[in-house]
Structure formats: structure tokens, C-alpha cells
Image (cartoon, rainbow, N blue to C red):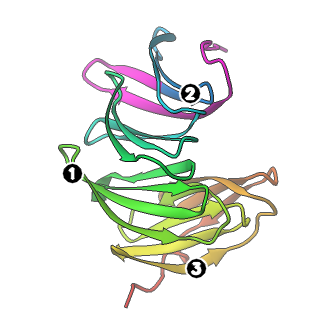
Amino acid sequence: MKQLYGHKHFIRCLEVIEEPKSNTFLLVSGSEDETIRLWDLNSLECTKTFLAHAKGVLCLTYLPIQKLMLSGGKDGRLKLWEILKGICIRNLIEDGPEITCLCSMPNMEIFASGDSLSNVHFWRIDKLGNTKFISSCQTEQSKIFALGYAGDGKTFFSGGADKKIKIWAIDELPLVKNVQILSGHEDTVSSIILFDKTMVSGSWDKKIRVWDLRPLLKVPSIP
């Protein structure tokens, strides 16, 4: 077992970047010490450290087509980075509630951010990294902790402090419609992972649930 040292406070989020040309993998970590760190997973050394968010970094997501990174923090800012250089190229949200989670939909060039007031904001990003705000929706989940995308171009999921997972139809953005609610967890839904036709959710109730999405994704389109 190897351990990486450097952060001075809780580590809140991790992302892995694959660099096929150099056959290397980079680990990106965000912490409540307000920094983002880059780690070479071959040498296990920290290659770059930079200040990112006042009060702490809460979430990260990598955009592989654009080779850019998104970060959200307790300072209410949503930032877009040339992560290998440690350069913030744009503040997409300057001031607001905590940005608690992020989700990218690369085949649609769309990403979403969730905040501590249970809002989800949708953005479009082209291959050159130009961004455009699309729309927002209020999930009414007290506080959002997790977002996930089904990969069908039509559906995303939100998990929050209301102990529920909500399914949303987004096939006609900017229109967003809640089409189903999943119950089962007994505390805040803190993480969601989707693959193939399966969703896995984790909760503060100390339970992991595995969901078969095949019947759940048969949801109506927005009229």
C-alpha cells in the first residue's frame, strides 16, 4: 500500500486523468485546505499545487474532450481550469451557495453543477472550451450531494439530503422535468455512479444500493 502526503486538511474529491501519449496517469485531488494537487501515479509524487477555492474544494470533474477540469468550492465559485498548467481560465459562477457536486456528459458536451440550495445548473461546452449557460432547475432536495448521468442523452440523477434519488428528463433542454423518485436510503444520498444499465448509490446510512436502470429509463419525454 502506498500513501501520498501533502494536503493539510480533509480531502473531499479525486479525479484521474489518463495521458495516452505519455502512458501516464495523473491523480487530481481537492481539499478543504483550499488547494488542488496533481500527482504522478507512476512516481507517486506531487507535481503541482495551487490555491483553488477559499474555504475548501468540494468537487471536481474532468472534461476529456476539452482536456479541462471543473472545480466547485465552499466559496460558491464554479471554476474551469487548464489543469495541467494550474491556470483558472474562467469563473462560471462568481458568488453563490456552495458548489457541492459536478457531473459531465461528454458525448453531449454538457455538464451540470449542484449546490447547497438544491439547484442544478446546466452548461454547454464546445470542443474549444467555450461555455454557455443553458438552464437551472430546483430539485427541492434540501441540499444536493450527488449528480449522475445515464449516458442515454436524456436522463440524469440527483441525490440529496432528502434521502431520495430523483430522475430527470433533459432530452429537450432548457426544459427539465422530474419523472421519477427513488426511495430506499435512510439518510442523505452522498454519491452516485452509473455504468452500463446500472446505478450504484452510497448514503450516510452506511449502505450501498445497486439499481437496475433498464425499467427506470423507460420514462416519458417532455411533452
Disc 2 marks a residue whose amino acid type is Glu
Residue at image position (63%, 30%) is: 32
Quadrant of the rendered image containing residue 220: bottom left
Residue sitting at x 76%, y 68%: 184
- Residue pointed to by mark 3: 180
Let me know if residue 19 is in the magenta part.
yes
In this picture, is 42 found above or below 36?
above
Residue drawn at (28%, 17%) of the image:
22
- Viewport quadrant of the N terminus: top right
Is there any visible trace of residue 150 in the rendered image?
A: no
Residue 12: give x, y in percent of width and height.
62, 35
The residue at the far bottom in this view is 223
Q: Which residue is mark 2?
A: 34
- 22 horizontally vs 120: left or right: left
Mark 3 or mark 1, which is nearer to you?
A: 1
Q: Between label 2 and label 3, give the one nearer the viewer.
A: 2
Picture coordinates of residue 221, whole percent (x, y): 39, 84
Q: CA distance from mark 2 to mark 1?
A: 28 Å
Q: Earlier in the sequence, mark 3 or mark 1?
A: 1
Q: Based on the displayed image, in which of its 4 quarters is residue 47 positioned?
A: top left
Q: Amino acid at mark 1?
A: Asp
Which of the two discs, 2 and 1, labels the residue nearer the N terminus?
A: 2
Is there a contact, CB below 8 Å, between mark 3 and mark 1? no
Q: Nearer the viewer, residue 32 or 168?
A: 32
Q: Which residues are magenta?
A: 1-27
- Residue under circle 1? 126
- Asked if residue 96 shows in the view, the reply is yes
Q: Earlier in the sequence, mark 2 or mark 3?
A: 2
Q: Which mark is residue 39?
A: none
Q: For the residue marked with disc 3, what is the amino acid?
A: Gln
Image coordinates of residue 23 in percent, x first then y, are 32, 19
